[in-house]
Image: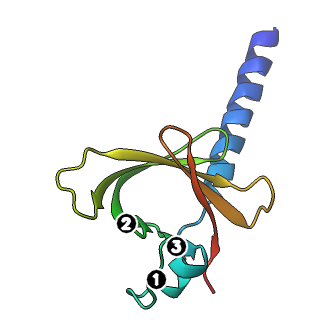
């Protein structure tokens, strides 16, 4: 008798996870200070820069174009990207995890596939 209720509870939790993931809206760009300044092209030289859009992740040394994105049950987004690093050719696909910052829900944290945090970004104004 309990099995149907457990299945319903599991389905509700899964649906809630997808709703949270849908909460990461990349239709407007996110970036750090220099990422937002440079969102329309290289306007200011910066050693460190992070810009995140719905199609790409750009740093001071590389540009990654997203080929796939998967919403995760925990509300994060895992994206697969093809990256071009300065001075390198033929990079294998990379994966990045994008999730809400634990410190500030308005910010997103970007981490590489090894879990190294690349930076925290806020919606560009």
Nearest the eye: 37 or 70: 37
Q: Secondary structure at mark 1?
A: loop
**Whether label 1 touches label 3, CB < 8 Å:** no
Q: x, y (%) of residue 16? A: 71, 43
Q: Residues within 10 Å of mark 1 (few under 14, many from 20)?
A: some
Q: x, y (%) of residue 53? A: 47, 70
Please tell me which residue is depicted at 44% across the width and 84% down the height of the picture.
Answer: 45
As measured in the structure, the alpha-carbon distance from the residue carrying label 1 to the one carrying label 2 is 15 Å
Q: Residues within 10 Å of mark 3 (few under 14, many from 20)?
A: few
The numbered dot on residue 61 is 2
Residue on which disc 1 sits: 39
Residue 125 picture quarter? bottom right
Q: Secondary structure at mark 2?
A: loop
Nearest the eye: 120 or 106: 120
Please tell me which residue is depicted at 75% across the width and 11% down the height of the picture.
Answer: 3
Give the total of numbered labels: 3
As measured in the structure, the alpha-carbon distance from the residue carrying label 3 to the one carrying label 2 is 23 Å
Residue on which disc 3 sits: 27
Residue 72 picture quarter? top right
Q: Is residue 59 left or right of residue 105?
A: left
Q: Residues within 10 Å of mark 2 (few under 14, many from 20)?
A: some
Q: Nearer the viewer, mark 1 or mark 2?
A: 2
Q: Secondary structure at mark 3?
A: loop
Q: Is residue 87 left or right of residue 115?
A: left
Q: Is residue 15 left or right of residue 39?
A: right
Please tell me which residue is depicted at 57% across the width and 73% down the height of the picture.
Answer: 31
Q: Earlier in the sequence, mark 1 or mark 3?
A: 3
Q: Earlier in the sequence, mark 1 or mark 2?
A: 1
């Amino acid at each position: 008798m309990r099995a149907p209720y457990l299945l319903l509870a599991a389905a509700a939790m899964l649906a809630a996870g997808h709703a949270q993931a849908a909460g990461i809206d990349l239709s407007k760009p996110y970036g750090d200070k220099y990422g937002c300044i440079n969102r329309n092209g290289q306007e200011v030289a910066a050693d460190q820069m992070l810009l995140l859009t719905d199609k790409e992740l750009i740093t001071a040394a590389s540009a990654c174009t997203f080929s796939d994105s998967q919403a995760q049950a925990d509300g994060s987004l895992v994206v697969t990207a093809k990256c071009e690093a300065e001075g390198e050719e033929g990079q294998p696909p990379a994966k990045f995890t994008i999730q809400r910052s634990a410190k500030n829900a308005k910010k997103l944290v970007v981490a590489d596939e090894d879990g190294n945090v690349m930076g925290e970004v806020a919606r560009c104004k």
